[in-house]
Image (spheres, coloured by chain):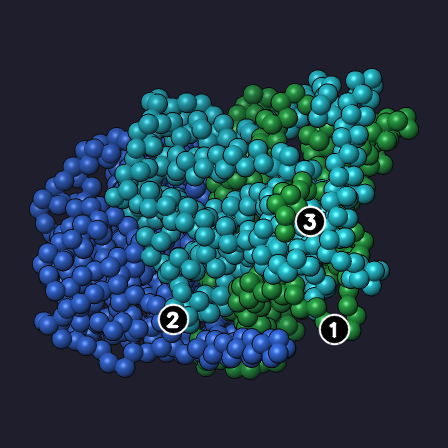
Amino acid sequence: MRNTKKFIASAAAIATLIGLAACGNGGGLSATVDTDTANAKGEVVFWGWGNGIKETIAAFEKANPNITVKYSSTGTGADTATALQNAIAAGKGAPDVVMLEDATVPQFVVDGSVVDLSQFGADKLKDDFAAGPWAKMLQEGKPYALPIDSSPEVFFYNKAVFDKAGVDGEAIKTWDDYYEAAKKVRALGGDYYIANSIDYQPFLAQVWQAGSQPFKVNGENITIDMNDEGIQKYIALQQKLIDEDLINPKITNWTDDWYRSLGDGTTASLTIGAWMPTDLETGAAAGKGNWRVAQLPQWNEGDEASSEDGGSALAITSQSKNTAAAYKFAEFLTHGDGAKVMADHGTFPATTKLLEDKDFQSKKNEYFGGQQVNKVLVEAAERKVSAFQYLPYNPYAQSKYGDDVVPAFQGKKTLKDAIAAYAKTLADYGTDQGYTVTVK
Amino acid sequence: MSSATTASLSYEAREKAAKRAERARQKRIARDEAAERKRAAKSGFANVNNPRRSMLLTIVSAIFAVYCLFPFVYLIINATKTQADFTSTFGLGFGKTFALWDNIVTVFTYQDGIFGRWLLNTLLYVVAGAGGATLLAIMGGYALAKFRFPGRKLVFAVIIGAISVPGIALAVPQFLLFAKLNLTNTPWAMIVPSLISPFGLYLMWIFSEQAVPQELLEAARVDGASELRTFWQISLPLLAPGIVTTALFTIVATWNNYFLPLIMLKEDSWYPLTIGLNQWKDQASTAGGTAIQNLVITGSLITIIPLVIAFLCLQKYWQSGLAAGAVKE
Amino acid sequence: MSDQTIHAPAGTAHSPEVRVNKHKADWRGWKFMWPFAVVFVFVFIVPILYTIYISFFQKKMIGGTKFVGVANYVRLFHDPNFWSSVGRVAMFTVVQVPIMLFLAAAMALALDSMKLHGTRFFRISTFLPYAVPAVVSTMIWSFMYGAKYGLVASINDLFGTNFDVLVPSVLLASIGNIVTWEFTGYNMLIFYSSLSTIPHSLYEAASIDGASEWDIVRKIKLPELKGSLAITVIFSIIGSFQLFNEPSIMQDMVPGNAITTYYTPNMYAYNLSFTGSQSNYAAALAITMAVITMVIAYIVQLKSMKEQMK
């Protein structure tokens, strides 16, 4: 009799297993997308992170009493993307609205996990957003997410250190100027460097600004070109900085050491996204009053090329059963009145209306010595950006950047070789995933 | 194995035999103790009743204790710092302002006081998860020690094999299984996996073998008591010291559980402390995030305190520990 | 059942007659074993079977899921990243586990000797590190290791030296130190509780025979430790083969990406599965690692453990 029980138990286990196997393969597309936003009601489940979200939700629920938003703080962008991936694999459990890092949007579009927002008329919002962030939302011309913030790459520098080194930060207009400044800062001795080794996101942003387009994705075809003119210029400059010991290879972005070195000025400048002020104020409080922000140095004097570094957006999952209400909320937070609430809590906005707001631009920031920081950032956000695409397997690309490229900043190999190896790694992976990859 | 003889004895005879054995044992212990006291007094040999302490050994151990405790000094010092001091002053020196109380208050009020919720969640997981794990380990260990059931010899080999599979790789299948049963995002996702403590099972196995005399079980069985009743009324009290040790291990394991809840729970109101604190830590490495390392440090310190209290409370039982239960012959 | 029997003090030597009925299977044990077994099957066995199952497939972003037989295993066999990570944890195990277990045993013997001033203090101070979550302990130690702002920096300033414990050549030792710090107390407790089971009468007898304290340690206590050593060795081998938390938390803190995405097999599995969407390959890796771990654990200790448990 007990043998029978045992048999039943194992049979049940096997049945579960087969069930599991079956659900592991499904993508989980919802049948219908409800676009009737005017009559939207019910509950919207929302995953995200960052400041000001609770306040924005409160404002939304006040304006839309028929809709409630159930928010869960899901950690970093990587954690949230992983959670979404798991929910997709399980075929259920995904939220209605999800916050994604801009660079990960394409991968969720490819597997059909997020819905095309032009169904809700989002394509008509194009002109309301700054060009940089909007461009990142598009896949084959259609928007799949709404940008929360714009994140133009800008140049932050420590004026106190620059003064000591005899460098005028305002006068750094080109990367050649930057290189000269790097030498002067290094001449201060000790641990003073103009920058530390370059992270994945700033790397992409800077080759983007140099006019490079390393990834071209067209359906199942990917072209990886890490050898074009823009990237060559970038490599030449960085290699010179590495060879002459002008950037600090020992400090990695986001570490405790990094914040400390930003606070005491030994890392004297940053080329990073426009969202950095909040991180600086709280992470490197000791640097208060010393920091300034300026436009990114240009490759040719007089150019006004910009690029995007980071940024996040809201997408609606294909598992959502309440897409109308979901869109209404996503629109409110990114484009409607909620965007203002977000901006009040430190988000650097993506809508042109908020960017051009006089009060917003004239706000003085004490951390930056009373500089009108937003004015500079807005100017950067409104500059032109060239075409750029992320790989549909961005998280992989990001993790392998560390393996392949970062050692070059330690002088273990040349940046040129490192980037060539990196291109090959990315191509091999793409091929393995079923793409037709061309390497140039 | 003289099972035939034992079986033929009457209940009374066996009860008498058990009592006789018990009396003999008591006498033996008394004799042991008396003799040991005498000997200890004479030779100065260290024992519980008459320890002669060694300065040298204490100093050597103290060096090791410094190694163990030193990192806590860092934690305590940094819990007194403001965020600004944390990133600008030396790690083992105090900051410009003493902000311990402010930090504690902020930890409990930040984000509408969610830390308190996390603390309660963790307590729930510990009570249900570690409590359940201890119970399962006791029962399983007892079964392994006291019964020769089919499959017994395989149990431990299977367990060792299963825990050799990297837990990371199991996380996704576990998630899919739990999702299928609608258990993700519920406390069950946290409690059920915590119920398994292979080490606790091993401990209770060894302990049961030593602490529960077979005679007592036989006597109870003859008396007509069911196996379960025998277990609850006779064996469990004898196992108390071992249970405490097992509980200590399972409590710590549940309290510090990190990876699985990270995958299973996506609702911040169900997070345990480890996930919540890590999220706070990550704010410092998020674009546009507010760095709050001072709260992370203070929160970590607060997280450890209940475990220290648990240890201090439990060590009273545990001190007499296994020794009380087991006399090997 | 008389009260007297229920409250009888523990410790009656159990009779050698554990009855085994050779003819009819004795299923009573399952009455107590089943709750553990059921949960175990649910939490471990089913997911493991599923992992084995998916290890024979490959899922592509373009083209979906396909049965590929043992292709994942063949590929793993030729994957230098995998073998370098296995080599690394093997080396880690060979060096770190003996050090940790030696420290744990030494501390357990010291505590058990009753010769320490303040035994209670030392007991809790040794155990306390185990109570710290890995995230926090790695954070603390990483601060100590900092060659620019950390404790190492201060030491360098003080003595004019130029240590850097985060360079690739000593990094593994630095991680080993964190693991040793975290788990010595855990193992100490296991050793200590097994020492507590030795009856005092044994010491007495030994002492009457003129044995020195050292003799007692050698002839009574160390043999007693052997049993728990078997289990701690097995658990430590499994633990270090699955090394993950410490290196992955330190990954972002160590300059120059000395900790790669395939630093340990578990980190490799994590990155394959979570950043590379290569769960099938990660599953093959997990199964292979389990087999390697079991073989090693078996060779090293499982036999002696089996003996101990009869």
What residue sits right under mark 3 in the picture?
Answer: B212
The amino acid type of the residue labelled 1 equals Lys
Which element carries disc 1, helix, strand or loop? loop
Which of the pair B17/C293 is nearer the observer? B17
Colour assigned to chain A in the rendering is blue
Which element carries disc 3, helix, strand or loop? loop
**Residue at 30% over, 33% down:** B105
The answer to whether the residues at label 3 and label 2 have Cβ atoms under 8 Å apart is no
Q: Position of residue B289 (x, y in %)?
A: 31, 46
The answer to whether the residues at label 1 and label 3 have Cβ atoms under 8 Å apart is no
**Residue at 21% over, 60% down:** A69
Quarter of the image with the N terminus of chain A in it:
bottom right
Colour assigned to chain B in the rendering is cyan
Graded by Cα atoms within 10 Å as few (under 14), some (14 to 19) or many (20 or more), the crowding at tag 2 reads many
Can you name the residue that lies furthest to the right here?
C209
What residue sits right under mark 2 in the picture?
Answer: A88
Instruction: Report the side of C45 relative to A419 (left or right).
Output: right
Graded by Cα atoms within 10 Å as few (under 14), some (14 to 19) or many (20 or more), the crowding at tag 1 reads few
Residue C251 visible in this rendered orientation of the protein: no
Q: Position of residue C302 (x, y in %)?
A: 75, 57
Location of residue B94 (image quadrant): top left
Q: Position of residue A378 (x, y in %)?
A: 18, 50
Colour assigned to chain C in the rendering is green
Mark 3 or mark 2, whichever is nearer to me: 3
Q: How far apart are the alpha carbons under marks 3 and 2?
A: 51 Å
Residue A273 position (above or below residue A31):
above
Q: How far apart are the alpha carbons under marks 1 and 2?
A: 50 Å
What residue sits right under mark 1 in the picture?
Answer: C24
